[in-house]
Image (cartoon, rainbow, N blue to C red):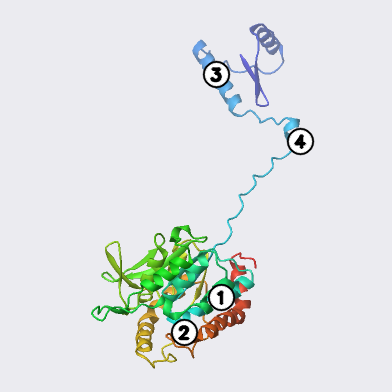
Amino acid sequence: MVRFARGLFRPVSFASSAVLQENFLKSPLPPLPPLPALSRRAFSLGCASALLSACTTAPTVTSPSASNATPASPVAASPQRPVRIGLALGGGAARGFAHIGVIKALEARNVKVDLLSGTSAGSVIAALSASGMNGIAINKLALTMDEASISDWAMPFRTRGFLQGVALQNYLNKTLDNRPIEKMAKPLGIVATDLKTGQPILFQRGNTGVAVRASCSVPSIFEPVKIGGHEYVDGGLVSPVPAAFARKMGADFVIAVDISARPETALTQSSFDVLMQTFTIMGQTIKAYELDKYADFVIRPNLAAMSGSDFSQRNAAILAGEEAVARIWPELQRQMATKGVAV
């Protein structure tokens, strides 16, 4: 027989059961109707059911030591990766000297650039900066650079361009000690255009001088550059300011530098100016889309009075770049703070 009391049970001996039955029969209570006899099988099943029921409803016991235990320390979060700043330098021929001023001004304000992308003239300055040269060193190099050292006229019978571009290639490789793109101190991307397909190409490996030469090869001014069976021309045709490529290279915050002239203010005094004006008009939509989608901040130096072919105003262009950063610095600082960049 099994006796239930307050949800608990314990077996009772048959001897005790007989005593209880005898006392129960002697009590003055009115007799109960006889109970049907239970078979041994039914009795066993009843015991088993009671046992299972008690097991499933048994209360949870908490030991005193568990209640006083010291809570486990939270797992330390892994340190957050620093925000990577990318600098995208656009094309603009001689106006590209303004990029130097921008770099100098950013360095003076402790803005650490982690990677660079460059198109056309911007690829020259991007390569120099990625090599580890600071803004002041690039400034000195630019002011002492002889324009003739980067100009090499093509032979009269070569009608695909007035300049070969080999001089520019050699000048840059010599300055960089023939360091390839992948060996730069900072990640470097150089943008050019595939002449056959019209698709952009981002050079991140190989001969730095050759890639920069391809990126600077303004059609009809420079001869196309052959690399690996393909011919390449100026990257400004497809990416005037390569903000999208800086993002593709891993930048979390992209600072784009647009040195192109506005069509309504551009000078058109020479055939080169007319050609550059054509580039500007053609690239307006592409540039606006790329900057709007991929650039976090755009710096536009005031170069309205400077022609793309006037190398004599390089110092003025450098100053314009510095002034542009000083002018927009509070806003740039605020934008960087929203992305977690501390300066």
Q: Distance between the residues labelled 4 and 1?
A: 71 Å
Q: Earlier in the sequence, mark 1 or mark 2?
A: 1
Q: Which of marks 4 and 3 is in front?
A: 4
For this rendering, which residue is in front, 157 or 186?
Answer: 157
- The residue wearing badge 4 is 68
**Residue 259 visible in rendering:** no
Q: In this view, does 318 lie to the left or right of 219?
A: right
- The residue wearing badge 1 is 140
In the rendering, at what x and y percent does residue 296 appear? 52, 71
User: Do tag 4 and tag 3 residues touch (Cβ < 8 Å)?
Assistant: no
Q: Residue furthest top?
A: 15
- What secondary structure is found at the residue carrying circle 3? helix
User: Dividing the image into 4 quarters, which one contains the N terminus?
Assistant: top right
User: Do tag 3 and tag 1 residues touch (Cβ < 8 Å)?
Assistant: no
Q: How far apart are marks 2 and 3 (CA)?
A: 101 Å
Q: Which of marks 2 and 3 is nearer the N terminus?
A: 3
- What secondary structure is found at the residue carrying circle 2? helix
Q: How far apart are marks 1 and 2 (CA)?
A: 15 Å
Q: Which mark is residue 311?
A: 2
**Residue 74 visible in rendering:** yes
Question: Which residue is painted at 64% across and 44% down in the image?
Answer: 75
User: Dividing the image into 4 quarters, which one contains the C terminus?
Assistant: bottom right
Q: Which of marks 4 and 2 is nearer the N terminus?
A: 4
Q: Distance between the residues labelled 4 and 2?
A: 79 Å
Q: What residue type is labelled 2?
A: Phe
Mark 4 crowd level (few <14, some 14–19, many ≥20, 10 Å Cα): few
In the rendering, at what x and y percent does residue 178 appear? 44, 62
- The residue wearing badge 3 is 48
